[in-house]
Image (cartoon, rainbow, N blue to C red):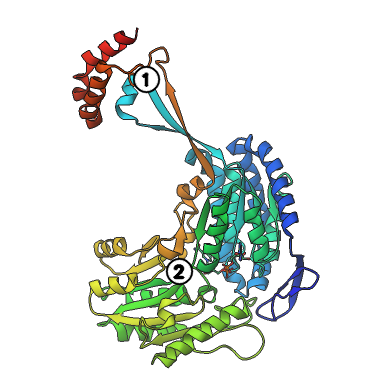
Amino acid sequence: MQHLKAQTQEIISSNPATGDVIGRVPLTSAAEVQSAVMRARTAQSGWATLSFKERGRVILKARELILADMEGIAELISHETGKPVAEAVSMEIVPTLDLMHYFAHHSAKLLKPQKIDIGQYGLMGRSSRMVYQPLGVVGIISPWNFPWATPLDEVVMALMSGNSVVLKPSELTPLTALKIAEVFERAGLAKGLVEVVTGDGSTGAALIDAGVDKIMFTGSVATGKRVAEAAAKHLTPVVLELGGKDPMIVFADANIENAARAAVWGAFANSGQACASIERCYVDESIAAEFIKAVVGETERLKQGNPTETDIDVGAMSNERQLHIVEDHVADALKGGAKVLSGGARLKGSGWFHEPTVLTNVSHGMKIMREETFGPTLPIMTFKSEAEALRLANDSVYGLTACVWTNNITRGRRVAERIDAGTVMVNEVVYTHGIAQTPWGGVKQSGYGRTHGRMGLLEMVSPRHIHVNRFGFVPDLWWFPYSPNASKLFRGLATHFTTGSILRTARLLPQMIRRLLERN
Ligand code: NAD
């Protein structure tokens, strides 16, 4: 069995495509987690005094080192996850290099102090600005499906904002996380700024209890709820990036061939183990036959096998537990009358492989349309109208991403805005997690808070409002002592000042002057 916790309190990392053990790491105890957080806290104070440019220099150095060791890193990711090496490069390394470049160069601008328009208070010599301070120590708890990109993106955003980081990677992919720490060490980052605590859920729980200043959690809904509950005990703010059951809607006017290709890549890339994978597909019944034929044709062309070979499209699933969930969902669908048009079973032999599987005759009563499958399945249903497509897409407890396929962009935008999801793409699938500039996060059970983009960077800082009064020599009208004249003025403020109209407020000038004189 893969990734067993041995008696020596170790985590064993093995290759899901072959079963070979590839490394052992310690299961970090609660006391050791506490020490890591303390080291991170000590290191952070110096780091926070550096300019954005100085911090960016370290990130860019790390970026250079990643580029130089790209093949080795991609192979390690592939060995730990079972995904094709090509995909480790395209879906993990490329977006991360782009994100490192973006935040190294743009964080200063994104976190620049901002003036706030305070309306009529501004006429009274006041001004307001937002400044953004580092939080301190950011705890990152990450899953196994993108073991490089998911934590590294957040490490970069946390560091650029002046924080230190304690990262608890998935127990299935600890070596990839240790590689992240190694890269930063070689880039000259001071000790303690990126601490990696390897371990399982108990280590993650210890990190929440160790008094970090924020938790960035990516994982399942069930664990996310436990994390939110544990963090609430310390009032630690949390970002929850959770699961999805992402729908794809294909309208009759879509480019059918391209939509079919998108469906196949969106459902089967990373063996369907992306939080934004297409998990449900709805196609207009008038083009369903043509679309489904194209989907099946594309699926049959996919090559599945040893993920280190360059022409392999689909590798192994990352663990046996996930493979069982896929088998269970397929079996449940078949019991309910679903038809398998391609694939349908796990591959015989060693490794956790499941065939890319296309299903029709599915319904919303089935697990495969309701629960997160997180595997290479593409169940397809038909719809008769836009309203029905929307109703089906929104009939889910999840809301991470969705996509709409149509040549009518106006319609695409209209439908996109009515789908309950954090990101809705028109004529695109999955990939916007790779755009550093755009926010990523879900609605409903897919979580709250954001990562990436300015919204993601703001999760890494403590926003502070600085308010200045240039007329510090004049007492405020609403201060003591109260008097009949003051009461009259307050009522006047209620009726005039609060309208936001300077002209109406001006009518109160005589009363205001009387009030000032009264106190002198
Ligand atoms: P998981 O919830 O099982 O584990 C996630 C992490 O939480 C792991 O590091 C695990 O060790 C840790 N953990 C477990 N119990 C804990 C506890 N009590 N306290 C603190 N930490 C604990 O998820 P997984 O199986 O590793 O990942 C798959 C899930 O992640 C899927 O549901 C997928 O949709 C989701 N995901 C979401 C996004 C997103 O951006 N929304 C991205 C990737 C994956």
According to the picture, the residue beneath numbered tag 2 turns out to be 244
Q: Position of residue 196 (x, y in %)?
A: 70, 56
Number of the front mark, 2 or 1: 1
Circle 2 residues within 10 Å: few <14, some 14–19, many ≥20: many
Q: Is mark 2 within 8 Å of ligand 1?
A: yes
Residue at horizontal 67 percent and vertical 37 percent from the top:
45
Callout 2, which amino acid? Gly
Relative placement, left or right, of 137 versus 91 is: right
According to the picture, the residue beneath numbered tag 1 turns out to be 479
Circle 1 residues within 10 Å: few <14, some 14–19, many ≥20: few
Callout 1, which amino acid? Trp
Residue 19, placed above or below residue 111: below
The C terminus, quarter of image: top left
Q: Name the quadrant containing residue 501.
A: top left
Residue 372, placed above or below residue 365: above
Q: Position of residue 12 (x, y in %)?
A: 74, 72
Q: Position of residue 71 (x, y in %)?
A: 67, 65
Residue 451, placed above or below residue 146: above
Ligand 1 quadrant assignment: bottom right
